[in-house]
Image (tube, rainbow, N blue to C red):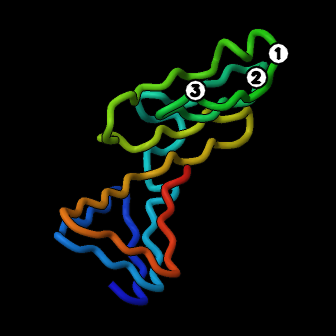
Amino acid sequence: MNNTLVTGPRIGFCSPTISVVASNVTAASKGCTAMQGLGAGKYNSSCPGSGGAHGGKGGYGSAGTPCSALVPLPYFYSGMAIFEGSGGGRGNSSRGGSGGGIIWLSSTDTITLDNSTLEVQG
């Protein structure tokens, strides 16, 4: 792949040799929407929304009690992601962001990334 933009919630490349040159492969913010997913962010009327979880705890909306009890726990512990990232919690007047998607690269020989980006953040 050369000088290409690939975007989506689940992106997979499976080939004996993978070459990504001057390209952008992005699943950024393509996971679960706000308040959705196995580790969805949470909120209540006195706390800002927490961040969504995946391989680690979600982010704190605020460090004070009872807000710290709203942090979602991780739900991914194995070697390969099978679920997209969860969405963040909402605040009193705004929605949380979407979680990140998934990019798989599977090769029996070589994977080359040259002047390219892979993005999956939420």
Q: Which residue is mark 1?
A: 64
In this view, the mark in front (1 or 2) = 1
Q: Position of residue 66 (x, y in %)?
A: 75, 10
Kindly identify the amino acid type of the residue bearing the numbered disc 2.
Answer: Cys
Q: How many neighbours does mark 2 have within 10 angstroms: few (below 14), some (14-19), or many (20 or more)? A: many
Q: Foreground residue, 96 or 60?
A: 60
Q: Which residue is mark 3?
A: 57
Q: Which residue is mark 2?
A: 47
Q: Are marks 1 and 2 in contact (CB under 8 Å)?
A: yes
The secondary element bearing badge 3 is classed as loop
The secondary element bearing badge 1 is classed as loop
Q: Foreground residue, 102 or 87?
A: 102
* Quadrant of residue 63 within the rendered picture: top right
Kindly identify the amino acid type of the residue bearing the numbered disc 3.
Answer: Lys
* Quadrant of residue 48 within the rendered picture: top right
Residue at 68%, 20% in the rendered image: 44
Q: Are marks 2 and 3 in contact (CB under 8 Å)?
A: no
Q: Measured along the vertical axis of the image, is residue 41 above or below residue 13?
A: above
Q: Are marks 3 and 1 in contact (CB under 8 Å)?
A: no
Residue at 56%, 34% in the rendered image: 52
Residue at 18%, 69% in the rendered image: 15
Q: CA distance from mark 1 to mark 2?
A: 9 Å
In this view, the mark in front (3 or 1) = 3
* Marks 1 and 2, the one that precedes in the sequence: 2
Q: Quadrant of the N terminus?
A: bottom left
Q: Foreground residue, 86 or 45?
A: 86
* Marks 3 and 1, the one that precedes in the sequence: 3
* Quadrant of residue 17 within the rendered picture: bottom left
Q: Position of residue 39 (x, y in %)?
A: 47, 28
- Is 96 left or right of 56, judged from the image as shown? right
Q: Position of residue 104 (x, y in %)?
A: 31, 57
